[in-house]
Image (spheres, rainbow, N blue to C red):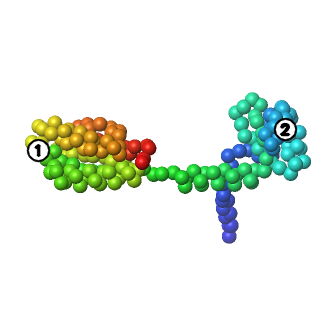
Amino acid sequence: MYKTTEVLFIAKLEHQINDDIRDKQVRLVGEEGEQLGVVPLEEAQAAALAKGLDLVKIAPKAEPPVCKIMDYGKFRFEQAKKEKEARRNQKIVEIKEIRLSSKIDVHDFDVRLKNAHKFLLAGDKVKCSIRFRGREMAHTDIGLAVMKRFAEACTEVSTVEKPPKLEGRQMLMFLAPLKNKP
């Protein structure tokens, strides 16, 4: 019986355009970026209409608000293209965890060191952790020495972002990759 209609908004308009602008006077900027001065709104809309373009409010907080004559569709397309390009060039830095122990053997230490080097060269951060069990809590200095030795072995590919710190029964240290990779 009743027909419901859904309104879908494709894109949220960030700028006021043409008839949405309600100010009495605006500072008008031409399509090439030239200043045309402070003019009444009707005159600005007429100038945009004469050129077959849109009047877009680009600085609403200014006194008087700044409006520019431009092709709004083309402007939105260029903005979307720039955002897409920025997202594509973003590198997501992951945090990889390396678990050590206070009584780690030489070979195990070397294997974890090799993995940490691989992670750091790939651009990821490394979280080193040592979990102390039982009586090991009385000898956290041994764990600290292992952490410092690990950080020293990684100096050519990383910097210590957060030095070793005891948090409860766990000691944590964060390594970040060097900015200038060879």
Figure label count:
2
Q: Residue 41 — which label?
A: 2
Q: Position of residue 17 (x, y in %)?
A: 76, 46
* Rendered view: 27 above or below 126: above
Whether residue 20 is visible here, answered yes or no, is no
- Front-most of residues 39 and 129: 129
Q: Position of residue 21 (x, y in %)?
A: 78, 41
Q: Position of residue 158 (x, y in %)?
A: 35, 43
> If the image is split into quadrants, where does the N terminus sit?
bottom right
Question: Which residue does the numbered mark 1 point to in the structure image?
Answer: 134
* Rendered view: 95 above or below 41: below
Q: Position of residue 123 (x, y in %)?
A: 41, 50
Q: Please tell me which residue is depicted at 34% across the width and 54% down the height of the picture.
A: 118
Q: Please tell me which residue is depicted at 66% across the width and 58% down the height of the picture.
A: 10
Amino acid at the residue labelled 2 = Leu
Nearer to us: label 2 or label 1: 1
Dot 1: within a 10 Å radius of its alpha carbon, few (fewer than 14), some, or many (20 or more) residues? few
Report which quarter residue 147 is drawn in.
top left
Mark 1: which secondary structure? helix
